[in-house]
Image (cartoon, grey):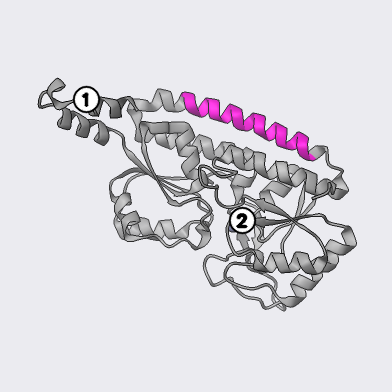
Amino acid sequence: MRRRSLLALPALLLPGLAPAHARAQTQAAPSVVASFSILGDMVTQIAGDRVRLRTLAGPNADAHSFSPRPSDAQALRGAALVVRNGLGFDGWMDRMIRAAGYTGPVATATQGITPRQMDAHAHGHDHGGAGRRHNHSVAPRQVPDPHAWQDLRFGIAYARTIAAALARAVPAEAAAIEANAAAYIARLEALDAWVRAEVAAVPEARRKVVTSHDAFGYFGAAYGVAFLAPQGISTEAEPSAADVARLIRQIRAEGITAVFLENMGNPATLERLAREAGVVVRGRLYADALSEPSGLAPTYEAMFRHNIGVLVPAMRGDAA
Ligand SMILES: [Zn+2]
């Protein structure tokens, strides 16, 4: 803001120097490219305006099936750092990096995390294509579950990895970056404790949630919630009628009241499933993307506060 007001001064106050000075300042902020909105928010929390951030798969975007535009590859060419999730979530980023000839640093947020395994065909949107088989006579292929950010402990690991990469990429700002990262991690630790306490207040037998796709495996394991999604449900492939029928029977038999859509993808299948099971869809969970800045989950922290805020009363069975 100060920079902008300086530029707004009449040129005669900064004789001849203003444009060159402005260019130098703009160029001084190195550019960082993040593959999707949650990583973009972490870069913002840690580096603020010390970097120019470009987030490729933005608010409410389905990063699994994102298609980069030519201008995205262009942004990569001048970047000081690229931040991606890894574990097959944003494989299009790897192809882009190769295609753009980018040879700078790449921070992989899931680096060092031992991933959960999931059935390839159970995942909402299988990435490679090779695993998208619905042959139930064959044991499903296991693939790493990429949604590690849904466990705040892993989110903290993401923040540490991103902070270290930012400090290396922008050494002149390393001290400020490290201080911001420490404050951010302290907030995430407090948020993790709050999430645990909120979930613990719900009787264990009631901690069952139905969602569109299998994005909450890490959340479920970390906080003790069973997430159910119709196998094969996807923006790309319809679940089988038998899978949907099985889930409807389970919802009825176990009295599951927490049924949610996600903020990305197609709601049609889950809405139909809820209707047939006779339950009310309790709203949307933010799964693989944040909301617009003016929305309900514009940051990673706000995403957890929103999700817990709707999950807990729904699991308890409070009136919708
Ligand atoms: Zn996903």
| Element assignment for label 2 | loop
Q: Does the residue labelled 2 lie within 8 Å of ligand 1?
A: no
Q: Quadrant of ligand 1?
A: bottom right
Q: How crowded is mark 1: few (under 14 residues within 10 Å), some or many (20 or more)?
A: few
Q: Does the magenta stretch include residue 96?
A: no
Horizontal side, residue 217 vs residue 201: left or right: left
Question: Would residue 167 be seen by someone viewing this image from the given angle?
Answer: no
Tell me which segment is drawn in magenta. Answer: 179-199
Residue bearing the label numbered 2: 145
For the N terminus, the quadrant is: top left
Horizontal side, residue 252 vs residue 30: left or right: right
Question: Would residue 78 be seen by someone viewing this image from the given angle?
Answer: yes
Q: In the displayed image of the protein, which residue is found farthest to the front?
A: 10
What amino acid is found at the position of numbered circle 2 in the picture?
Asp
Quadrant of the rendered image containing residue 119: bottom right
Q: In the displayed image of the protein, which residue is found farthest to the right?
A: 253
Horizontal side, residue 49 vs residue 108: left or right: left
What amino acid is found at the position of numbered circle 1 in the picture?
Leu
Give me the residue at 71% from left, 65% from top.
271
Q: Does the magenta stretch include residue 184?
A: yes
Residue bearing the label numbered 1: 9
| Element assignment for label 1 | loop
Judge whether 213 appears above or below 244 on screen: above
At which x and y percent is residue 219? 69, 47
The front one of 86 and 245 is 245
Horizontal side, residue 188 vs residue 103: left or right: right
Judge whether 107 appears above or below 182 on screen: below
Give me the residue at 66% from left, 42% from top.
306
